[in-house]
Image (cartoon, rainbow, N blue to C red):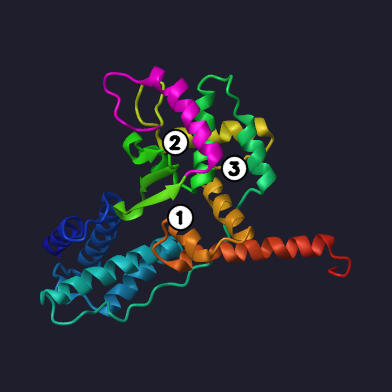
Amino acid sequence: MQTDIEDFIIHLATERGLSDHYQLSTRISLETFRAWLQQTHGIARSAEATREHFTGFLEHRKRAGMAAASIKLNVVALKIFFRWLRGLNRIPLDPAELLSLPRLERYLPETLNEQQVETLLETVLEGEPLGLRNRAIFETLYACGLRVSELCGARLEHLNLDVRILRVTGKGDKTRVVPVGKKAAAALHAYLEGERPELVRKHTKSHVFLSIRGRALTPDRIWQLTKEAAARAGLSSGVYPHLLRHSFATHLLGNGADLRVIQELLGHADIATTQIYTHVDGQRLKSVHYKFHPRAR
C-alpha cells in the first residue's frame, strides 16, 4: 500500500495539479490508515482492505476524539484513493465505493455589521508607522473578499489600479480576477507610492504587501495586525482576518447581489459553500424584524 500511496500523491501533483497542502493532507490520511491496518490486522496490501476495515478505522478515529470534519477528510481521501486504484486495475473491486461521508453540523460564519467594519477601517490611521500599508491591507481584505493567503500572495504584476482589478491565486492553485473598490484602490495607491518603496530590499520580490524586512507578509502577521486594530477600535477580541471575508459576502447579499456573483467573487467551487451566507442574512433579517416590528414579539 505504501507504494500505491506514493504513486497516488505523484498523480495528484502532476496530473491533477493539486496544491501541496491538499497532497499533504491526503498523504497523512492514507498513511494513518495504512499504519492502522498494518498494526491492527497485519495487512499491507491495498487489495486486502475491506469496507469493514474502513468502518473499524473510522470508529477508532472517532473514539480518539477526532472531529467530524477531520473524519470526513479521511473518508474523502480513502474514497478517491481506492477509486483511483480500481481505475488502474490495481485492485479487483473498490471497497470504499459505498463508504458514506459523516454528516457535519453547519456553523453560521460570524460577521461584522457595516458600521463595525467602518469603525475597524477608520481606526487604522495614516500617521501611524506603516499606517498606509495596514489601511490598504484591511481595505483590500474587505473590498475584495480575499482569503488571507490570497492577500499575502498578491503580486504587483497582478494588480491594475487603472481598471481596479486584482488577480489572486486561491485554493487548489485556482486563479480568479476580483474587482477592487474605489476606497481600497485609493488606499493601495497611497501605500504603493508612499510606503512600499521604503520597505524594498535587495531580496524583495513583487509581493504587494511587505514586512519591514522587505519580505512578503505572513498570515500570522496579518492576524496580529487585525487583533491590534480591533482592540483599538473597541471591537470584540473575536475579530480575525477571515471575518472581513465573511462580512464582504454577507453585506453583498444583504444589498441585493446575486448568489452566483458572490460565488465567483469568493472563488467557491461549489455554490453550496456560498449558500451558507443566505442563512446568515436570514438570521439578520429575523433579528431586525424581532427588534423593530411592534407585533413580532
Density class for disc 2 (Cα within 10 Å; few <14, some 14-19, many ≥20) is few
Dot placed on the residue nearer the N-terminal end, 3 or 2: 2
Residue 224 appears anywhere in the view: no
- Which x, y percent locates residue 201? 31, 19
Residue 233 visible here: yes
Name the secondary structure under disc 1: helix
Residue positioned most to the front? 162
Q: Which mark is residue 162?
A: none
Q: As rendered, which of 90 and 211 lies closer to the eye?
A: 211
Q: Of the two numbered discs 2 and 1 on the same chain, state the one appearing first in sequence.
A: 2
Specify the amino acid type for callout 3: Val
Up/down of 86 relative to 150, above or below: below
Q: Nearer the viewer, residue 14 or 49?
A: 14
Residue 70 place in picture, x, y as percent? 40, 61
Is residue 194 rendered magenta in the image?
A: yes
Q: Quadrant of residue 232?
A: top right
Task: Please report the bounds of the magenta region as a residue range.
Answer: 180-208
**At x 36% / y 69%, what residue is drawn?**
58
Gap in Å between the C-alphas at discs 2 and 1?
A: 21 Å
- Name the amino acid type tagged 2: Asp
Q: Which residue is mark 1?
A: 266
At 40% from the left and 43% from the top, the residue drawn is: 166
Q: CA distance from mark 3 to mark 2?
A: 14 Å
Residue of label 3: 239
Number of other residues with Cα within 10 Å of mark 3, as a class: few under 14, some 14 to 19, many 20 or more? many
Q: Residue at x 80, y 64 (%)?
A: 290
